[in-house]
Amino acid sequence: MPLDSYVGLGSSGLKVSPFCLGAMNFGEDGGTGCGVEESQRILRAYLDHGGNFVDTANLYANGHSEKILGDFFARHPGLRDRVVLATKFFGNLHVGDPNGGGAGRKAILSQVEDSLRRLRTDYIDLYWLHNHDWSTPVEETLRTLDDLVTAGRIRYVGFSDTPAWFTAKAHTIALLRGWTPVIALQMEYSLLERTIEGELIPLARDAGMAVLPWSPLKSGYLSGKYTRGAGIPADTRRAAVLGTPSEEQYKVIDALTAVAAEAGASPAAVALSWVRGRPGVTSTIIGPRRFEHLEANLAGLEVRLTEEQTAVLDEVSAPALNFPAELNRRVGPMLKYAGATVDGQRTSAYPPLVESPTRY
């Protein structure tokens, strides 16, 4: 599947690439990203491959990520309107200012103008709430975002890293009030982080929201750099902060390495292929810091895992989900179908029942 094999973004009219270019590593302000030249080389290559979906945030590299993108598109007239450009609000770039961040009206209006200035554009295609603001009424946030859509400053609204209950509440209020709904969720999702399968992915699929996984390689743990007993990779800048995988994580990494060898692909490509094939996933965010990272990540579009290979990865990475997800999965069919065969699957009855037309 090439980058220009576009997919619909949830129930919206947007069409985006199956891999979204995440620009969190654009800019060296913060110490872990890449410089301007390398950032723009990565961006140019992504676009040349047919990619059309770029994601950043006001907080990335203290605003430098947005500026790098803005300067690039300003130097290439005509490209901006061909790209779905997304950024996020919430992060406070003004130390000591209690209204500088969050999801209140004053904060949002200030943040969107700053992002538009750095991005050197008149509008943002997809504007993400970056976190749950527990101290601001959700109606205030939603109405402000709807006003921005009406004014043409943003086109669509998404939520990132928000709880399922809050996301469902916000989306329902937006629909009931006739305000701009939530079309997409951006959440961490990988072979080493699957807990969104309990609440968030079912919510997204039911509501017609796109799911965009971030950190599909779990900060490099699934990239192939980490192998049991090899220690911390010398070229991993964040290793001092992240440390090394745990024993449970190495069990997944070992299985991934074995599947990758069998598939004739890199562990990174296999991990990305697995995420891309998960139910509900629309476009996966890749965040290369070097040009070769981009090339390695794009290989994930070409990997086709067999059912057996997928089953191996599914089993070894199976998450422990919050109550009542596991109870519903195990007991629900027993209670509902009482031993009937449904969709080709035979269910059991609970408690054991004998065939009878009546019950007491």
Image: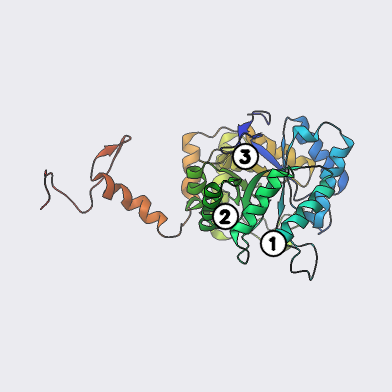
Q: Is residue 219 left or right of residue 163?
A: right
Q: Residue at x 54, y 47 (%)?
A: 175
Q: Nearer the viewer, mark 2 or mark 3?
A: 3
Going by the numbered disc 1, the residue's amino acid type is Gly
Q: Earlier in the sequence, mark 1 or mark 3?
A: 1
Going by the numbered disc 2, the residue's amino acid type is Tyr
Going by the numbered disc 3, the residue's amino acid type is Ser
Q: Is residue 264 above or below residue 33?
A: above
Residue under label 1: 102
Quarter occupied by residue 100? bottom right
Q: Residues within 10 Å of mark 2 (few under 14, many from 20)?
A: some
Q: Secondary structure at mark 1?
A: loop
Q: Is residue 333 left or right of residue 315?
A: left
Residue under label 3: 283
Residue reaching furthest to the bottom: 96
Residue under label 2: 250
Q: Earlier in the sequence, mark 2 or mark 1?
A: 1
